Image (spheres, rainbow, N blue to C red):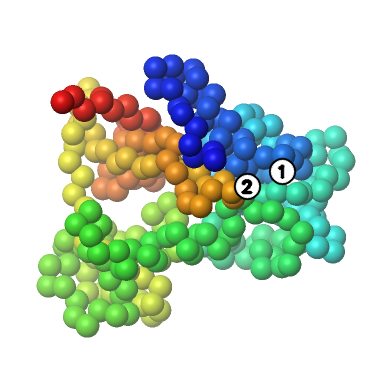
Amino acid sequence: MICQIALPVFSMDLLEKAIKKVLYDTIVGDSDPKYVVLLEIEPELQNTYIDMLSTSVELEIPVVCVTEVIKEGRQLFYTNKSGEKIRIEKIYNRVIFDELYQRPDLKLNFKFTDDLDVEWIGHPNWFYRISKYIMPYLVNKYVPETYFLHELKEIPADLENYVLKPLFSFAGAGVIIDVTREDIDQIQDKSNYILQRKVTYEPVLKSPNDPVKVEIRMLMLWPKEVEKPFIVNNLVRLSKGKMIGVKYNKDKDWVGGSVGFFEEAQD
């Protein structure tokens, strides 16, 4: 199985090639890359466009805006740079519904709920299946105490230790860090919000000026023939703002994304 590939830690070049192969097998697989698209909302305007371009180069797949997709029957198509209409067999989905709902100006020729003859690499429903929605159900010392707002019987007296988040927002949109009772009272649909105990990030890395906070995210792949996802790499996010993310670090330096290397534990 793919998840049993031995990744040689002694060679970064071989490690990089092995990870790229797993990524290619998961997204492109046995398809011709021209029939596989990376789908996004106005990709060239996204903060992560550089990542999409890198993915496009590595996998040799086009980056396509949702408004450029053509629907004929149950099939989807896009137009390549040569003006040819190409059928879409697989979609590497990067569209976040919360952003899509906020863009009524976009004219789509298909719906994500349509019965389509296409394979989703990252089905749209995953955003609901694997998201902040599951946090209230996770009770563990490593998971911040989290409540659905509409199920709260009493608002915590120490609200300064909590953060208010929309369930399906992205990139920190709608998050209230310094939440008040007035903020909670003004929310009409409380079932779409969570109240989460704040996580205090320690500024553990030194920089030429202010120290840097660190968040480590595990990057996983889930090939369709494998029972569960597995870790292939990590992403170290660096921040000096109140939260981790681009919008909170626009005037900062020595922030952004990196990769973490870990020393093997010695006996």
Q: Nearer the viewer, residue 42 or 132?
A: 132
Amino acid type for the residue under numbered disc 1: Val
Lower sequence index among marks 2 and 1: 1
Q: Nearer the viewer, residue 25 or 1?
A: 1
On-image quarter of the N terminus:
top right
Q: Nearer the viewer, residue 159 or 194?
A: 194
Q: In the drawing, does residue 48 fall left or right of residue 79?
A: left
Q: Looking at the image, is 210 positioned above or below residue 105?
A: above
Residue drawn 69% across and 36% down? 61
- Secondary structure found at label 2: strand
Q: In the drawing, does residue 178 fall left or right of residue 78?
A: left
Q: Which residue is mark 1?
A: 36
Answer with the quarter of the image where residue 86 lies.
Answer: top right
* Residue 5 numbered tag: none
Residue drawn 28% across and 71% down? 147
- Secondary structure found at label 1: strand
Q: Residues within 10 Å of mark 1 (few under 14, many from 20)?
A: many
* Residue 92 numbered tag: 2
Q: Looking at the image, is 232 positioned above or below residue 85?
A: above
Answer with the quarter of the image where residue 165 lies.
Answer: bottom left
Q: Are marks 2 and 1 in contact (CB under 8 Å)?
A: yes
